[in-house]
Amino acid sequence: MSPNFQRDGYQIFRQVVPSNIIERLRTYLERSVASLTEATEATAIGLLPLKNRREPILWELAKAESVQNILKEILDAKSLCLSLAPTARFVPPGDRRPMVPAHQDSSYVTHLSNFVTVWVPLVEIDEKCGGVSVFKNSPAEVLPTRAVGNWHEALETNPSLKVDCAPMSPGDILIFNKFMIHQSMPNLSDRTRYSIDYRFFSSSIPSTRSYLSIDDWMIYDEICHPETKEMFLVEFEFDQYMNYIAGRPAEARPVKQ
Ligand SMILES: O=C(O)CCC(=O)C(=O)O
């Protein structure tokens, strides 16, 4: 199912997300962007604010069995987990500020030892309304880099190794590994680009940050015991998790490990 991923570290899978899921995700992003009232830092870099990205509607992608099967094979996983919260992006026509410079996701996602990124376009992607470019032969190691402003400084790249992942249509997904060097393509079209990128990992990998289990749809997180100061794993229903992150009383069940 994924020979190119195994060989190249990335692969586009065509028409694997049901159109009703794409429709719901796109409508949610369009409405969320329309309701943004102030020009925050998040909006300047084309990211929906965290409160929008925490909404369970973004989990819909993970409900598609076709997507689950691909991910289980690639990650060699019996069950899957989704790092929270996914990154929902919008790039207005001709706006270059949201363009993410060349990077490896492992520089940003340091709390997981292994994961893949799933990039999901919600509009037609072509050479004008660009999506993501990847760089072939990316090294299988984390390259040193440091955070500068909103992003990490751009990695040095070889233009002859660049592959523009275009065209892509809603329903297609791009999956790449944690070492893959990639960057945003500009949106030179007259349309807003909507997309979401997710980080999935196998349930056999520990995570020190909150994640969703695709088995039982519970949210798991490590919290610090108020007296012993030891970290231990708890599970939350979504509403209780929202209470927890808002600093309100929340019911969390300790998980036996
Ligand atoms: O969507 C983009 O422009 C960038 C995506 C990206 O950098 C990522 O998925 O890690």
Image (spheres, rainbow, N blue to C red):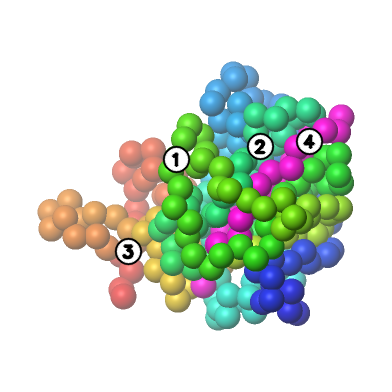
**Does residue 195 show up magenta in the picture?**
yes
SS of the residue under disc 3? strand
Per the model, the C-alpha gap separating discs 2 and 4 is: 9 Å
Say if disc 3 is inside 8 Å of ligand 1.
no
Label number found at residue 228: none
Q: Mark 3 sits on what residue?
A: 233
The amino acid type found where label 1 is placed reads Ala
Per the model, the C-alpha gap separating discs 2 and 1 is: 15 Å
Q: Nearer the viewer, mark 1 or mark 4?
A: 1
Q: Mark 4 sits on what residue?
A: 187
The outermost residue toward the left is 227
Q: Mark 1 sits on what residue?
A: 147
Q: Residue at x 56, y 48 (%)?
A: 155
Residue 26 appearing in the image: no
- Upstream in the sequence, badge 3 or badge 1? 1
- Residue 191: which quarter of the image? top right
Q: Count residues near mark 3 (Cα–Cα under 10 Å), then give few for <14, some for 14-19, many for 20+.
A: some
Nearer to me, 6 or 232: 6
Magenta segment boundaries in residue numbering: 178-202
- Upstream in the sequence, badge 3 or badge 2? 2
**Does residue 147 show up magenta in the picture?**
no
